[in-house]
Amino acid sequence: MKYDLPPSTPPTPQQVTELNDALVTATELEQIYAALARHPRVQATPGSAEVFESCREQLGQDIAVLDEHLESMKLLARSAPATSEGDGETPPHLASFPDVEPAAPDQSVFDTVRRAFYVEDFLRQQLEFSLASARASGHRKLELQLKMIVLSVAQRCRLLEERYSFARSKNAFVQGLRKQTTRFLSRLQGEERRDID
C-alpha cells in the first residue's frame, strides 16, 4: 500500500518527523511486550503470556504499516523540489514530550506493565498528531491507516486492562485494592497468577 499523495503536495518535514517518532515509539513498545512475554512470572501464567504475545504481534503489523508509509513519504519528500518553509524547525508539540526509553529487563511485571500503559498513551498522542497532519493535507489513505492503528492501540489497552487494570491507576491504595481483587478473582477461576507483584 503506497502513500496516497498527489504529486503537487509533497509531505512536509513535520509530517515525516511525526510519523518517524510514532514508528520509534511503536518499536520500543514492541520491545517492552517482548520483554514481558519472556518474563519468568508471565511465562508461569499462560493467559498473561498469550496477552503479551498477541499485543506484540498486533504491534508488529502496525509497525510494518507505519514503516511502509514512512518510506513512501521520505521518497516523495526527496523527489519534491526543496522549499525553505519550515526547514530545520522542531514542531513545538513534539518538543514537549519526554524521550521514551525501553524497559529494563529486571523490572517487575507491574512496573513494566505500567510502562507499557504509559508508552501506549504516548504512542496514541503521536498518532493523533500524525492523523491531524494527514487529515489537514488530504492524504486519505494515510489517514485511514492511522485511524486503524489508533483503534489497535485502544484494543491493546483494553486487553491489558482486562488482566492488569491495577497497573493503570496512579493511586497506590487503589493499585493495592485492584491487585488483591485480581488475585481473588483469578483464584476463583482456578488460575494461579504469579505475574501480579
Image (spheres, rainbow, N blue to C red):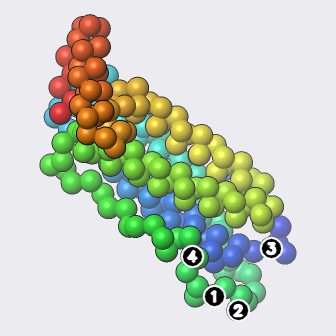
Q: x and y percent of residue 84 in the render?
A: 70, 92
Examine the rendered structure and indicate whether residue 5 appears above or below residue 122: below
Q: x and y percent of residue 20 in the render?
A: 53, 66
Circles 2 and 1: CB distance less than 8 Å? yes
Name the amino acid type tagged 3. Thr
User: Which numbered marker is on residue 140?
Assistant: none
- Mark 3 surroundings: few (<14), some (14-19) or many (≥20) residues within 10 A: few
Name the amino acid type tagged 4. Pro
User: Which numbered marker is on residue 92?
Assistant: 4
Q: Which residue is mark 1?
A: 87
Does residue 77 show up?
A: yes
Q: Quadrant of residue 36?
A: top left
Circles 2 and 4: CB distance less than 8 Å? no
Q: Disc 2 versus disc 3: distance between alpha carbons?
A: 15 Å
Secondary structure beneath dot 3 equals loop
Q: x and y percent of residue 8 in the render?
A: 84, 75
Q: Which residue is mark 2?
A: 84
Nearer-N-terminus badge (2/4): 2
